[in-house]
Amino acid sequence: MSQERTHVLIAGGSLVGLSIALFLRRHGADVVLAERHPGTSIHPRTPGYNARTMELFRAAGLEEAVRAAGPWQLTGSGLLWAESLTSPNHHWLSPPNARGAQEGFSDVSPCDDAVLSQDVLEPVLREHAEALGADLRFGTELQSFDNGPEGISAILADRATGARTMVHADYLVAADGANSPIRARLGVGRSGVGVLEHVAGIMVRADLGDALGDKSFAICQVNNPGFSGMVRVIGDKMALHVPYRPDLGESPGQFTPERCVELARAAAGIPDLAVEPLDVLPWQTTAAVADRFAAGRVFLAGDAAHVMPPAGAYGANTGIQDAANLAWKLAYVVRGWASLALLDTYDAERRPVAQLTVDQALATGREWFGAALPSDAGAIELLDEVTLKFGYRYGPGDPFEDPRHPSGAPGTRAPHVWLERDGKQVSTVDLWADGLVLLAGPGGAAWTEAAARIAERDGQPLRPYRLAGRDGLPSTTSRLTDGGAPFVIDRDNRCLAAFGITSTGAVLIRPDGFIGWRAPETAGRRCGAVLDDACRQVLGRANS
């Protein structure tokens, strides 16, 4: 058996696993990914990715590629109720907590939502991760692993040839789905209301041509005597999601090719529609969160860590945001820039967010589709869309803030402000794309000087920037400040207020776009020592 070595081993090559691989490589960590299926998903599943997720893709350099892969223009809200796909009896269902499509998110983000299916997004993630050097092994199964104090020893098997490889890794990430074998092996339980519904996901090929008329939707709720369930149409394929009742003896095996054809024709409202059955994938609508997101050197992410009802498409987005939080921490630890204590913050930060988001998905289904909440779910107040997507916080205090009125406090997402860098418009979101960022006010040269010294001393990516006001660079055309850091010009004079600092203050922004530390004003001669302590705190090295 051959032996190999890597920093991080990922089990699961769907959206979350591919995102983790991509983000890890962006930060220079070695990664091997094992996915048992021979390729990316053929099922469309998640219909869209919210603007916060698109910020992460923007920082990783693939926002444009994602949008180009799925230029899907929707009619109405994109959510349709109809007697059948071709029936004139239909209406649009407005999301209960969303701003109108014409409003977008320009006041809080440089990005808007993207509407495309999972089977379209996954190849984009795969291509970019491989281009960065990620070792992605499809058709490869994780057969066993040892979660030792010094690292992970795992056996991977090629499902086509049977060849086995021993991979030694510093860490293992379980992105292996809702029924995660790794989570079960670790003995990690889940809490929540549990299974709400059993669903058969049916994929067929059926060209509706012009039969849909001017209806372009992300999801359609179809109700008629022959079909009741959710439908998506992607090109010449239809995805049908049909509930079934195991308690009444029903099972996925009852969805034979013949029945799939009947259901597709009933959903379409075309009795003689040509239908080719492709696949049936059973799944469960579930609301549950793992009791731990980490065990030794193993970390849970995506559906392995949390599952939630599909209303709002929060599950995939939450998983990708898990990936961004975990990847930079793993990368900084394996590259020697951070201590092991940093990894403890993954569970502390992401598990409360997952619990809150599961509740919001339940409440969204209640308000949107009239879904009854289980009695043990309790009372859940539905948050507005902007707050839910951008306002969640890490650390003590309120779990959310209003991102339209950002506090700039540590633990909150760094607010979006348009700036000018080297004559080009950039967002504050673009500053943290490559690592830790120190953003100082116009009078914060002492902070940027200290950041430059720390970066050189520790050999880590810590990039300082200094703000200039609407009049541009102060008394010089140089691109460098007195503190040896590039200028970014704040022509609207919004940045200081958005981050809650004075002209002599500074903030430290983490590689996932969250604020790790803030000094509202200068610390005088102690700027170097104060910033050094701050960097140690953010990187889990406070006691080292």
Image: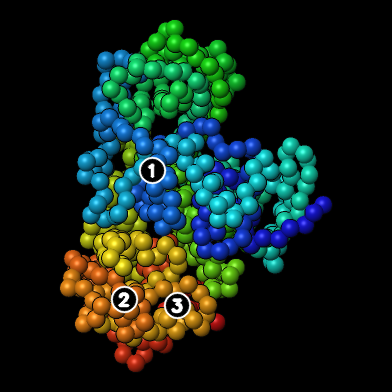
Upstream in sequence: badge 2 or badge 1:
1
Residue farthest front in this picture: 477
Q: Disc 1 on helix, strand or loop?
A: helix
In the picture, which quadrant includes the C terminus? bottom right
Measure how far apart labels 3 and 1 are at the Cα level: 35 Å
| Residue 239 located left or right of residue 34 | left
Q: Quadrant of residue 58?
A: bottom left
Badge 2 vs badge 3, beta-carbon distance below 8 Å: no
Percent position of residue 163, x then y? 78, 44
Residue 277 placement (x, y as % from top left): 54, 18
- Reply above or below: 145 against 238: below
Q: Which residue is mark 1?
A: 67
The numbered mark at residue 479 is: 2
Residue drawn where x is 44% and y is 36% of the image: 117
Please tell me whether mark 3 or mark 1 is closer to you in this view.
1
Number of the label disc, if any, that sits on residue 535: 3
* 131 relative to 313, above or below: below
Residue found at x 45% / y 77%: 535
Quadrant of the image occupied by residue 435: bottom left
Question: Tag 3's secondary structure?
Answer: helix
Tag 3: Cα neighbours inside 10 Å, few (<14), some, or many (≥20)?
Answer: many
Point out which mark residue 170 bears.
none
Please state which of residues 341 and 518 is positioned toward the viewer in this rendering: 518
Residue 150, position as x, y percentages in the image: 70, 67
